[in-house]
Image (cartoon, rainbow, N blue to C red):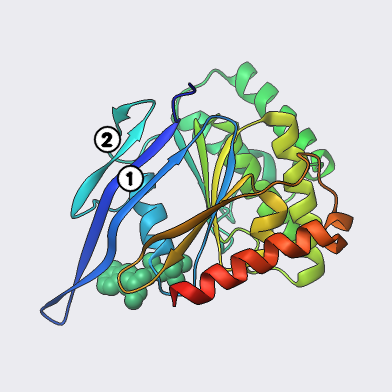
Amino acid sequence: MTEPKLVVQNITHSFRHRGQSLTVLKDVNLNLYPDEFACIVGPSGCGKSTLLNIIAGLVKPTSGNILIDGEVAPGPGPDRGMVFQSYTLYPWLTVAENIAFGLKLKQIPKVERQARVAYYLDIIGLTRFANVYPKQLSGGMKQRVAIARALANEPEVLLMDEPFGALDSQTKEQLQEFFHDLWEKTHITVLSITHDVEEAVFLSQRIYIMGHRPGTIRDQLDVTLPPKRVLDIKLTPEFFELKRKVILSLRNTV
Ligand SMILES: Nc1ncnc2c1ncn2[C@@H]1O[C@H](COP(=O)(O)OP(=O)(O)O)[C@@H](O)[C@H]1O
Ligand SMILES: [Mg+2]
């Protein structure tokens, strides 16, 4: 049997709020398998970002563990790459310099760094924009660069928090298709969070459904669509049926 790449083990988390303890996550468990694309779907405020920050090591949970390849993950590390909803590129660096940023920190030699940057620029289709600054890019292009920056570090797992949430619907769909292609080419292990049911069905192999008060995984669903997906799949009865299942499941969790 395949061992999971990432295990979320009994995560419970409380914030202190006005002197009171607010339990945001309770007994969250999930497994993410190698090369799998999984999504967590849940209503706003159910604790999705908190969970992703805990998985990334940015927030220390009240209890529970995050395991990578069976070992307890220490704080944040390059094994977990992160892409956020808002644009987080460094405005004073060019596209190529943004992608190279983590590689420089890791003291990867210049020749290899340049090769990796060129490779990921090509993958995101922005080779021509290597020397451009983020302010000259559209929102969709910025998110492609943010994805390339995370991938250039060759993380074990890519974590994404509503990565297409700030984009208009057309750009969002283009990027979903782009990202699906990229996942097919690179076979990275991805855990993405969204409140967008259609996005979750389109992108993932498995969907975890989160409910709130306290936030926990209430249900899961295997996405039985073919692995190769283009936007037209959204118009098929199979797609619609999966979407319906997720929507009903979300309703039951509220
Ligand atoms: N740093 C914090 N301190 C106190 N409460 C927080 C903090 N961060 C998030 N929360 C609360 O935790 C709950 C879950 O937030 P969040 O993880 O951002 O949800 P989601 O990403 O699903 O919208 C919300 O009620 C939010 O107000
Ligand atoms: Mg959030």
Provide residue 96's location: percent of width, then percent of height. 68, 39
Q: For the view shown, which residue lies furthest in the bottom direction?
A: 18
Establish if 162 lies above or below 82: below
Provide residue 44's location: percent of width, then percent of height. 47, 75
Q: CA distance from mark 2 to mark 1?
A: 7 Å
Is residue 4 visible in the rendered image? The answer is yes
Establish if 229 lies above or below 240: above
Residue 114: name its quadrant: top right
- Whether pointer 2 and pointer 1 mark residues with C-beta atoms closer than 8 Å, the reply is yes
Residue 22: name its quadrant: bottom left
* Residue 95 as seen in the image, left or right of residue 8: right
Say what amino acid the circle numbered 2 marks. Answer: Pro
Q: Quadrant of ligand 1?
A: bottom left
- Specify whether tag 2 is near ligand 1 (CB below 8 Å): no
Q: Which residue is mark 1?
A: 57
Q: Which residue is mark 2?
A: 74
All told, the count of numbered labels is 2
Is residue 138 visible in the rendered image? The answer is no
